[in-house]
Amino acid sequence: MKTTVRRYIGKVMPDGHLSLPEDAAKEIGSVFDVVLMPIEEPDVYSYAESIARDKGFADLTEHDIEKIIHESRGIR
């Protein structure tokens, strides 16, 4: 079995669960080694939000911005 390492930015949800990318969330019962490293979330999101405003994309949702950030970092 080939092992693939995937990196992504997750968020702790209000119920205490960690958000997962869709493909990982479908692997019910799988066990992963998880390392939690905080990121400077306000800086990342405020930067993306300012770009969205400047480019006329003010209607983007937080999910849209997260997707842009993940794709810009090569994270799937």
Image: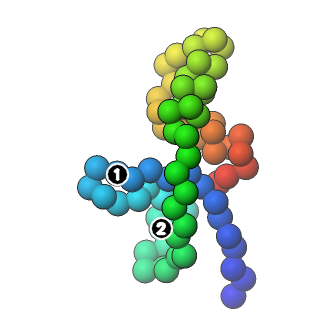
Note whether residue 23 is visible.
Answer: yes
The three-letter code of the residue at mark 2 reads Lys
Nearest to the observer: residue 41 or residue 48: 41
What residue is disc 1 on?
A: 13
Q: Residue at x 52, y 70 (%)?
A: 34
Viewed as shown, does residue 37 lie left or right of 29?
right
Q: Secondary structure at mark 1?
A: loop
Q: Quadrant of the C terminus?
A: bottom right
Viewed as shown, does residue 36 lie left or right of 5?
left
Vertical position of residue 71 compared to residue 2: above or below: above
Vertical position of residue 17 compared to residue 47: above or below: below
Viewed as shown, does residue 68 lie left or right of 58?
right
Nearest to the observer: residue 56 or residue 47: 47
What residue is disc 2 on?
A: 26
Residue 67, percent from left and from top: 58, 41
Residue 36, percent from left and from top: 51, 61
Residue 55 is drawn in which quadrant? top right
Q: Earlier in the sequence, mark 1 or mark 2?
A: 1
Q: Residue at x 48, y 58 (%)?
A: 20
Vertical position of residue 12 compared to residue 72: above or below: below
Residue 41, percent from left and from top: 52, 39
Q: Residue at x 69, y 88 (%)?
A: 1
Note whether residue 22 is visible.
Answer: no
The three-letter code of the residue at mark 1 reads Met
